[in-house]
Amino acid sequence: MSQKKAFALRLDPAVHAAVERLAADELRSANAQIEMLLREALKTRGIEVKPSKPPRRGRPPSGD
């Protein structure tokens, strides 16, 4: 399973409020919105980050 890296991020309150408004408009969490904005900014600078594989869903295969 893909692990997400957790870290503290200090933002200007006005930037945080703007991110939360944008996230709400696009039906995303603020965290998902920040990740999307970072990916867009990296792509603009010529750095493409491939998305990680999503976690597998459902029951694991039986060992029989």
Image: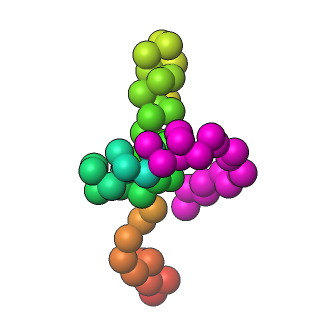
Depth order, front residue of 24/31: 24
Q: In the image, is residue 38 part of the stretch drawn in magenta?
A: no
Placement of the C terminus among the 4 image quadrants = bottom left
Placement of the N terminus among the 4 image quadrants = bottom right
Vertical order, 34 against 55 (above or below): above
Residue depicted at x 53% and y 39%: 15
Residue depicted at x 44% and y 83%: 62
Left or right: 14 with respect to 23?
right
- Considering every residue shown, the one lying at the far front of the view is 14
Vertical order, 63 against 49 (above or below): below
Q: Which colouring convention does the figure follow?
A: rainbow
Q: In the image, is residue 4 part of the stretch drawn in magenta?
A: yes
What secondary structure predominates along the stretch shown in magenta?
A: loop
Q: Is residue 25 in view?
A: yes
Residue depicted at x 47% and y 24%: 41
Residue 13 pos. (x, y %)? 59, 46
Question: What count of labels does the image hold?
Answer: 0
Vertical order, 2 against 58 (above or below): above
**Which residues are the magenta region?**
1-18
Depth order, front residue of 56/9: 9
- Considering every residue shown, the one lying at the far top of the view is 46
Residue 29 pos. (x, y %)? 42, 57
Residue depicted at x 44% and y 35%: 37
